[in-house]
Image (cartoon, rainbow, N blue to C red):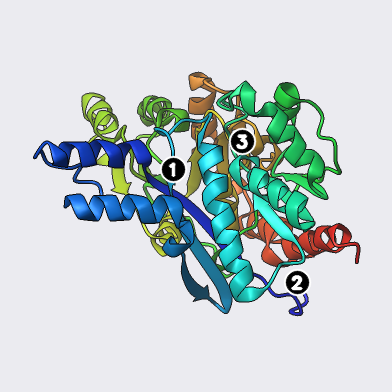
Amino acid sequence: MTGNERFGVLSVRLRHSVPMYIRSILRRLALRPADPALPGTRLSTLCRELTRRWFEPRSTVTVAEWQGTPVVRVEGLYGTPPSRRYDPIWWQRTGWAGYREYCARYGRPDLIHAHNTISAGLLAHRISRRDGIPYVLTEHSSAYQLDEVPASLFPAVRAAIAGARAFLPVSKALLQSMVTRIGQPDTEVTVLGNVLPRAFMAVPPRDRAGSPFTFLTVGSLLPVKNQTLLLSAFAQVLSTRPDCRLVLVGDGPLRQSLEQQSAEAGLGDRVEFAGLLEPEQVRAQMQQADAFVFPSQFETFGVALIEALACGLPVIAMASGGPEEIVTPANGRLVAPADAAGLVAAMVEVASASGSFDAEAIQASARTTWGPQEFGQKLRAVYAKACGA
C-alpha cells in the first residue's frame, strides 16, 4: 500500500443463543440454576441481557485500535440453536448493527473487503445493495471442499459473488471446489493466496547439521488434520531412520487419543506434543526443526506451509488442495492423500537427503512469493480497479 489509504476492521461474533436465554429464564422461574455459560445467572440479569443483546446489538460494540487501525467488535446472539443453515441470518443481523456503529464513528467506507462468502460476503452484499458501497470478496473456507455448505444457501452465495467487484479465492483448488458446487462465479476472479506474516520475513535459517533429525507439524488436533496417519507413518520411518523425532504443535479433541497411539506404538521421547503455542513460539519451533510435515486431508491454502518455507524448511504435504500450488520439487515433496506408504517414503527421503535442499533459496522464494510487499501490490491493484480509480 502507498500509505495514503485508511483502513478499519469490523469483527462480528455470535455468542450464546435466544433459546439458551429462554431456557435459563424458565429454569430460574422454576427455582432451578441457569446455564453457567451465560453472563449472570439472576433472573433480572438474564432478562435484561437477552433484551439488550437482541434488540440493541449496537450496545455490545467495543472499539479499539491496532497499530493505528480502528477495530470495531460487535457480539450478537444466535436466534436459533447454531446451525450452518441459519447462522448467516444472525451473523448478518449482528454485522449490520456493527456496520452502522462503524459508520457513525468513522464515516462510510469507500470499499469493503469481505473475508469468506458466509457470512461476511452476504453482509457485504446487503450493505452494497442498501448503501451502494462496492466490495471485494476473499474466500478461505474449506467448507466447500468438505461439502458443508447447505444447498439452501447457494443462491445467496452466488448473488454475493456476482455482486462483488472482484472474487479472490486463495487457491485454484478452492475455486474449483466452489465451481463444482455452485457454478462458475459471475464476476472477475483473481486467485490470491494468503500473505506471509511480517514476523517471518526476518527469521534466519538454521544450520541443520545436528541430530536428531526433527520433523515438525503445526495444526489443530482434528481428524481432518490427519495426525493419526502421521504418527503411524513416523513409527515406520523410525525403523529406517531411528535418529529422527517428531514434534506436534497444536491442541484439540484428538490429543488424548494421539498420545495413546504414540504410547502404544512405543514412540516414547521420539514424539513430543508441544501443545498450543504463541506465534513467536511456533517460529522458534520452526527454527529448531529440520523439515515440516503437513498431513492435512483438505486445505484451501496452507499458511503453516509458507511460514515453514520462510524459515528455510523443506516441506512434505498431502496433495489436498492448496499445497499443490505451494510445494515444488525444489522445496519439498507432495504425497497423495491418505497414502501412508508415500508419506513414509517422503519423510525418509527428506531426512536422508536434507542437504540437497537449499534453505536460503527456499526462504528467499517464500518471502518473494507471499511476502507483504508483493501481496500488498496485488491487493492494491484489486482495490483500485474495484473503486474505479
Q: Which of 59 and 68 is in front in this view?
A: 59
Q: Which mark is first along the chain, 1 or 2? A: 2
Horizontally, residue 159 falls left or right of residue 10, namely right
Disc number at residue 356? Answer: none
Q: How crowded is mark 2: few (under 14 residues within 10 Å), some or many (20 or more)?
A: some
In terms of secondary structure, where does tag 3 sit?
strand
Q: Mark 1 points at which residue?
A: 219
Q: Name the residue under label 3.
A: 333
Alpha carbons under labels 1 and 3: distance apart:
19 Å
Going by the numbered disc 2, the residue's amino acid type is Met
Rendering coords of residue 25 (x, y %): 22, 42
Horizontally, residue 261 falls left or right of residue 229, namely left
Mark 2 and mark 1 in contact? Answer it, CB < 8 Å: no
Going by the numbered disc 1, the residue's amino acid type is Gly
Q: Which mark is first along the chain, 2 or 3? A: 2
Splitting the image into 4 quarters, where does residue 241 fall?
A: top left
Q: Residues within 10 Å of mark 3 (few under 14, many from 20)?
A: many
